[in-house]
Image (cartoon, rainbow, N blue to C red):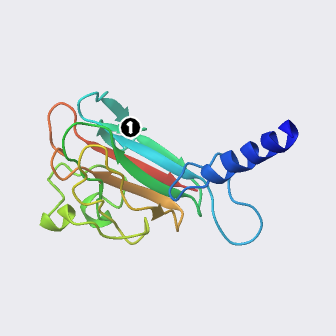
Amino acid sequence: MSALKTIALALALTASACTPNGISAVGGGGGGGGGVTHTVDLNLTNAVVTSTPYGTSAAFTPPITMAKVGDSIVFKNTDSFNHTSTSIPPSKSNNETQFPSAYPFNGSALNQSGMTLSGGWSSGSLQAGATSQTIKADKAGTYLYGCFFHYGAVPTHMRGAIVVQ
């Protein structure tokens, strides 16, 4: 009887690990889907300023997320106040090679939009503890983004990059 309980417990734990937006340790297998889900933390309070090939980055951990086509990205606000994760259009970022010095956002960044990296996105205003929609890494490339509220905050510059191969 204890062997049956052990098997039942193992099955229950396996089933509970399959949650929407959960972090997967390996890519999805066989056939059409999936990939790894990368979680990026948004936290200005614990920001570490990092020099990247795109300019100064901070408050997104990791500052550069490496992904593969088919992977997904979610942003989690681990801070005590609101943040956004909002894509910076290539036209405002020297074709995704440099964070723009001018503020790149408008009020639409406060509303959730977009489901793919190549189409642009905004998490909308994420309250403390909230997680964004899942954003699909649909095309290879470099995607720069920042926080509507804190993009130009000195010295932290709340911005990051996603590189998809």
Number of numbered callouts drawn: 1
Q: In which quarter of the image is residue 50?
A: top left
Rendered location of residue 131, percent (x, y): 36, 52
Rendered location of residue 24, percent (x, y): 61, 49
- Name the amino acid, label 1: Thr
Identify the residue at image location x=52%, y=68%: 138
Would residue 26 be visible to someone looking at this image?
no
Q: Mark 1 points at which residue?
A: 52
Q: Nearer the viewer, residue 7 or 80?
A: 7
Q: Nearer the viewer, residue 33 or 6?
A: 6
Q: Which of 7 and 144 is in front in this view?
A: 7
Looking at the rendering, in which quadrant would you find the C terminus? bottom right
Would residue 34 be visible to someone looking at this image?
yes
Q: Nearer the viewer, residue 69 or 127?
A: 127
Identify the residue at image location x=69%, y=59%: 28
- 30 horizontally vs 40: left or right: right
Mark 1 crowdedness (10 Å alpha carbons): few <14, some 14-19, many ≥20 = some
Rendered location of residue 4, percent (x, y): 84, 44
